[in-house]
Amino acid sequence: MISHAPKIAGYVAAALLVLFPLVYSAGNYDFVMHLWITAFYYAVLASSWALLAGYGGQFSFAHLAFMALGAYGAGILDNYVFLTSLPTGTCTEFGFLGTNIVFLPPSGTGDAAACLTAARATWPEGATVSRFPLILQIAFGAIVGGGAGWLIGTLVLRLRAAYLALFTVGLSEILRAVLSAEIWLTRGQAGMPMSPLFPDGITILGTTYGPAAKLPAYYVMLALFLGTLALLLWVARSRIGLFLRSLREDEDAAEALGVDTVKWKRAVFVLTAAIAATAGAVQGHYVGLITPNTIVLLQMSLVIAMAVIGGLENVVAAAIGAILISFALEFLRTDFTILGVEIDMTTWRLVFFGLLLMLTLRFLRNGVIQGALMWIERRGVGAETVAKRRAAEEAK
């Protein structure tokens, strides 16, 4: 019974998360839903980075770069590519029209909205135009991120430890500079606007929710979080996880034992990059804007801190750590008064988490959450052993 406790606890936690927005009815409903959505987003990033670094030993600082590529990939489809009922060759003055797909370039005739307005005047009666389907936008973002992960995984095949970290830091900064400079496509520091997850609203259990409603976005991000966690757990507990751990422990020894280190290094980069890109695409649609500043080093450091404090070698612990820290960051926005002195927590909260990270690395190398889970597991195994001994004695 004890051995099944973690699985049962996971199912119970998932059920509670599904039911929570249906039973919670306080006045700060939208704010709390927003906190959970943000927490799920960070949990996806932290747990996927934990697989990359904690299992595969690849300490990459480009994780948020993949996230941004996914968001911008989805944003380009959202802003510049539309589905139409027009025949091929229509409106070539305003864009390049393929079979029912029109690409409206962001330069030349103006933005996409202006192009559409001008183009409609020349279209036959009854012609329709619609945005690219949301699921295809997110899938395209994941493909862009996964493709970038394959490329980076290939480039860093012989880079390890500090060299890999420095390379990926430089790569992220280059991408941020490119996204800022290519205003014609990305709109630079002003950011690329993105439509809501459900622009026309959605009906759930007989209730219609508008484009800005939090509950549909909550369930989309929750589904992404639970799906990601299930996938990462499967990978970690399979032979793939064993191969990844061999990369972390001793790559040369793994090669000597016949492990295809090139294959698995690429694979873990592709998988985690695609997950980060998917999270970026969904978060971009939820927030409504994506900017180059989402990949600054401070944000990447926050994701790493979440994974390390939670537990690098346990994707569930990393996810729990990310959720708890997300809520703690919001809680610590409030200023405190101690002994008559008002403390501005906007600044000191970063100091607090820096100290927590240092203490974790010094005294709890496995992470705070993972250490707690291991302690609970040992207590459970100990209780099970005692129960078996007592049963055996009573049987005698």
Image (cartoon, grey):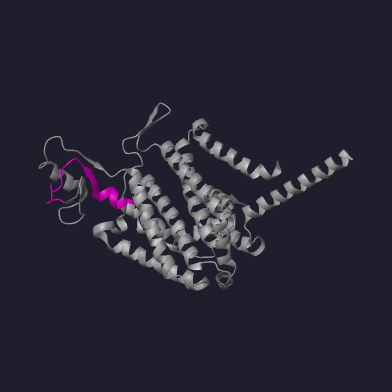
Q: Is residue 197 above or below residue 189?
A: above
Quarter in which the N terminus is drawn: top right
Looking at the picture, tell me which residue is in the foreground, 342 or 214: 214
Q: Position of residue 127 (x, y in %)?
A: 16, 38
Residue ranking furthest to the right: 396
Residue ranking furthest to the top: 206
Residue 352 in sight here = no
Quarter in which the C terminus is drawn: top right
| x 48%, y 60%: residue | 268
Q: Position of residue 104 (x, y in %)?
A: 20, 51
| x 63%, y 59%: residue | 366
Residue 177 in sight here = yes
Looking at the picture, tell me which residue is in the foreground, 388 or 377: 388
Q: Is residue 102 above or below residue 357?
A: above
Q: Quadrant of residue 292?
A: bottom left
| x 29%, y 64%: residue | 181
Is residue 163 rendered to the left or right of residue 388? left
**Residue 81 within the segment the image draws in magenta:** yes
Q: Which segment did they paint magenta? A: 74-95
Residue ranking furthest to the front: 258
**Residue 183 within the segment the image draws in magenta:** no
| x 59%, y 42%: residue | 10
Q: Is residue 307 above or below residue 223?
A: below
Q: Tag count in the figure?
A: 0
Q: Position of residue 343 (x, y in %)?
A: 55, 54
Q: Position of residue 68 (x, y in %)?
A: 38, 57
